[in-house]
Every structure is written in C-alpha cells, then in structure tokens.
Amino acid sequence: MKGIIGYFRALLSPQFAPTGIKVAVIVGTILLTINHGYATMAILITDLSFFSDRSIGIKQK
C-alpha cells in the first residue's frame, strides 16, 4: 500500500510534470505517425473522414 501512495505522490508532483508532458508529446506524435502516417502523407484525412466510423473500422449495415 505504501508503494501505491508513493506512486500517486510522484504522479502528481510538479517536479515530474515537465518531463511527463515532454514524453507524452513525443510518444503521442510517434503513435499518431504510426497509425495515421500514410493517410496524412496522402492527404486523405479531412475533418470529416478523421472522425467517421469507417476510419476506426466500424462496418455500416
């Protein structure tokens, strides 16, 4: 239980926030590029197709 409390204290610590934000931006950019890189390069993503059901693989009946 002591480890869990220490984890949440570190998670909410202002000392680690700048590093956490930098890591989140870098990892998020890499994952976005992996998942949508081809469509971005081919300019297939529009504001509507990005949020459509087909872009996440849901088949319409």
Image: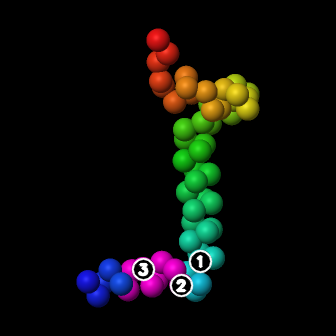
- Camera-side residue of 2 and 27: 2
Q: Is residue 53 above or below residue 32?
A: above
The rendered magenta stretch, by its main secondary structure, is classed as: helix
For the record, the magenta segment spans: 6-13
| Image-based side of 47 in relation to 30, left or right | right
Q: Identify the residue at horizontal 61%, vertical 27% (top origin).
A: 52
Residue 8's tag is 3
Q: Which residue is mark 2?
A: 13
Q: Is residue 19 visible?
A: yes
The residue under label 1 is 17
Q: Quadrant of residue 19?
A: bottom right
**In the image, residue 1 lies at what x, y percent?**
26, 83
Q: How many marks?
A: 3
Q: Are discs 1 and 2 less than 8 Å apart at CB?
A: yes
Furthest residue to the top?
Answer: 61
Q: Earlier in the sequence, mark 3 or mark 1?
A: 3
Observer-nearest of 20 and 12: 12
Mark yes or no: residue 41 visible: no
Point 73% across, 32% down: residue: 47
